[in-house]
Amino acid sequence: MTLLNAGARFPDLTIATVDGGEADVREELAGHFGVVLFNRGSWCPYCVAQLRAFQRHQARLTGRGIKTISLSVDDEATAKELVAEHHLTFPVGHSADARAVSRSTGAFVNEDPLYLQSTGFVLDPQGRVVVSVYSSGAIGRLVPEDVLGMVDYIKGHAA
């Protein structure tokens, strides 16, 4: 398993979205700072809290040119319920192949039941990793305030 460190190019990753389409993560975020969130599933209160926090901050994030995308192993119906219940407006993927995602990104996998552990990436507008946050359990994850601060810092110190 290879972890994605700062400067690494985010791998090709296409996800099935709750609107019935597909999204190529790099294409979806191209030209913007991006936040990629892998969550354990709609059953996880910490994951739901993280997604809700990113939703509450969507106006600030998009106002600063930051896009968000999320995915989990939840089936389509469960992911749709999550989006509807919490009024999520950013792309939410479902039915992720946990082992394949882990191979390409280094995300930790829970084997039984099978799901991705919480993992987060902040990407620069060229699709390179600025920071990666890997968790091996329920806690330890990106928060929108940190993302906003980091992007502001990077923009303020650009050559």
Image (spheres, helix red, strand yellow):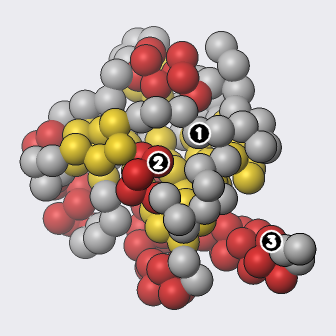
Residue 15: % across, % down = 30, 39
Circle 2: residue type: Arg
Circle 1: residue type: Phe
User: Where is the N terminus found, in terms of image quarters?
Assistant: top right
Residue 26: % across, % down = 46, 48
Circle 3: residue type: Ile
Question: Residue shown at 34%/65% (left/top)?
Answer: 90
Question: Residue shown at 41%/73% (left/top)?
Answer: 55
Which is more toward the observer, 49 or 129?
A: 129
The answer to whether residue 12 is above or below residue 36 is: above
Kindly tell me whether residue 153 is visible in this rendering. no
The answer to whether residue 36 is above or below residue 4 is: below
Residue 25: % across, % down = 42, 47
Mark 2: few, some, or many residues within 10 Å (few <14, many ≥20)? many
> Which comes sooner in the sequence, label 3 or label 2?
2
Q: Could you give the CA–CA distance between mark 3 and mark 2, rounded to whole angstroms?
A: 20 Å
Mark 3: few, some, or many residues within 10 Å (few <14, many ≥20)? few
Any mark on residue 10, and which? 1
Any mark on residue 154, and which? 3
Any mark on residue 26, and which? 2
User: Where is the C terminus found, in terms of image quarters?
Assistant: bottom right
Q: Could you give the CA–CA distance between mark 1 and mark 2, rounded to whole angstroms?
A: 7 Å
> Which comes sooner in the sequence, label 1 or label 2?
1
Q: Secondary structure at mark 3?
A: helix
Query: Would you say the residues marked 1 and 2 are in contact, meaning their CB atoms lie under 8 Å apart?
Result: yes
Query: Would you say the residues marked 3 and 2 are in contact, meaning their CB atoms lie under 8 Å apart?
Result: no
The answer to whether residue 58 is above or below residue 131 is: below
Q: Secondary structure at mark 1?
A: loop
